[in-house]
Amino acid sequence: MQDNSNFVDEAKGMVERAQGRGVLIRILGSTGFRIHSPEYVSIHAAMDRPMTDIDFVAYSKQDRQFEAFFIDEGYKPVVAALTPELFATRRIFNHPTNGIHIDVFLDELSMCHKISFRNRLEIDSPTIPLAELVLEKTQIVTLAEKDIKDMLILLAAHPVGDNDQETINGKYIADLLSKDWGFYYTTKLNLVKIRNGLTVHGHLFPEKDTQHIQERLDLLTRMIEDAPKSIRWKTRAAVGPKVKWYNDVDEVERAEFLQDHSDEDNQ
């Protein structure tokens, strides 16, 4: 297994080399969080947050180009075999010598909820925009402790605002969630879980950072709640969580403080 610095260096280097060949790829996942919060690397490590693979997003229109790029980088594509449906919006590569596993998502991340990256990959580099890094985590119904750790360092490092310039674009997030009650509801629950995670890991941060995280969670929550909701959102909200509001994905192990609040919310 590679150490964390190797993951960061490998990912950033691949984005640069791909760009030199006219191929656009962007980093997401834990590596993206680490890249965007370099001053918090020691805290990320103190929380025992390892990186085990590298995730990218690319445009499907460049499918052949980025596959050729990864092959030239020494990675071997995983053949669809018995699960072709897994490869409809994803490509998987493994390196035979350095042990790095790569997932490449095409145009969107479709898990518990769908995040579209169309016309968004050009906004930031080498990672996806900060708003999408947040959405990548808040779309997870069964949130894992590792996701809490990633979100805490991102919120410590970046303000919430209405643009994408080293800022978590709360306006973009709120606008997106105002059209999709299911995604909104999952995000609402997860923002509470992230706040609960701060009570567990907050001692690792300077006091000013814990205050910033709390304030940024408050602001993001307020922006999401205050955004005008679509008729579709209101119609689905009337049904509520008694009808499943998310797509099923593999279960993950959860820490004690990550218990679902949906039952409490319904009482």
Image: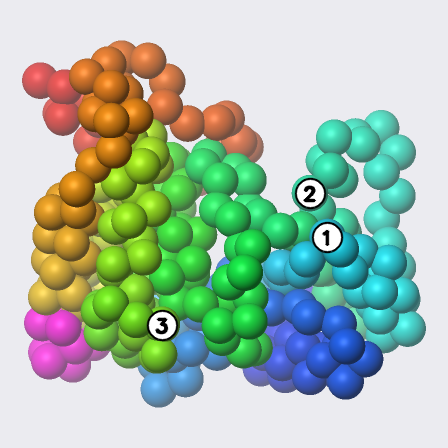
Q: Residue at x 30, y 42 (%)?
A: 177
What residue would you read off at disc 3? 164
Vertically, is 152 above or below 193?
below
Q: Residue at x 32, y 57 (%)?
A: 172
Vertically, is 91 above or below 205?
above
Question: What is the secondary structure assignment of the residue under circle 2?
Answer: loop
Which marked residue is nearer to the observer: mark 2 or mark 1?
A: 1
Q: Quadrant of residue 161?
A: bottom left
Evaluate whether residue 28 shows in this view: no
Q: What's the CA distance linking mark 3 and mark 2? A: 25 Å
Which marked residue is nearer to the observer: mark 3 or mark 2?
A: 3
Vertically, is 79 above or below 261?
below
Viewport quadrant of the C terminus: top left
Viewport quadrant of the N terminus: bottom right
Where residue 7 appears, as percent x and y from the top left, is 62, 75
Label drawn at residue 21? none
Q: Residue at x 25, y 33 (%)?
A: 230
Where does the magenta region start and end? 205-212
CA neighbours of label 3 inside 10 A, class few (<14), some (14 to 19), many (20+) = some
What residue would you read off at disc 1? 60
